[in-house]
Image: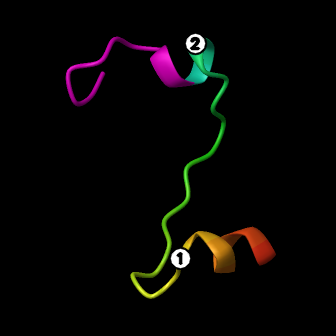
């Protein structure tokens, strides 16, 4: 439980398995190309 959301919202409800962080200089286009 974090940020005021219920447990399992992202893993069970939305099916999210991973979380990634990018560098500030990356934009949507550069992320889509990798």
Percent position of residue 26, x then y: 52, 82
Q: Is residue 26 above or below residue 12?
A: below
- Residue 1, labelled with which disc? none
Q: Which residue is mark 1?
A: 27
Q: Is residue 28 visible?
A: yes
Whether pointer 2 and pointer 1 mark residues with C-beta atoms closer than 8 Å, the reply is no
Q: Split into 4 quadrants, where in the image is the C terminus?
A: bottom right
Q: Which residues are magenta?
A: 1-10
Q: Is residue 20 above or below residue 34?
A: above
Mark nearest the camera among 2 and 1 is 1
Q: Is residue 12 magenta?
A: no
Front-lying residue, 10 or 30: 30
Q: Which residue is found at the position 39% from the left and 13% from the top?
A: 7
**What residue occupies the far right of the structure in this picture?**
33
Q: Split into 4 quadrants, where in the image is the N terminus?
A: top left
Give left or right: position of 13 versus 1.
right
Percent position of residue 33, x then y: 79, 76
Q: Which residue is mark 2?
A: 13
Give left or right: position of 10 versus 32.
left
Give left or right: position of 6 versus 30.
left
Q: Which residue is found at the position 47% from the left and 16% from the top?
A: 9
Q: Is residue 34 visible?
A: no
Q: How many numbered marks are there?
A: 2
Separation (CA) of disc 2 from disc 1: 27 Å
Q: Which residue is found at the position 26% from the left and 28% from the top?
A: 2
SS assignment at label 1 = loop
Q: Which residue is found at the position 44% from the left and 88% from the top?
A: 25
Q: Is residue 10 above or below residue 28?
A: above
Q: Is residue 2 magenta?
A: yes
Q: Residues within 10 Å of mark 2 (few under 14, many from 20)?
A: few
């Amino acid at each position: 439980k974090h940020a005021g959301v219920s447990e399992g919202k992202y893993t069970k409800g939305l099916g999210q398995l991973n979380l990634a962080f990018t560098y500030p200089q990356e934009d949507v286009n550069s992320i889509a190309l990798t």
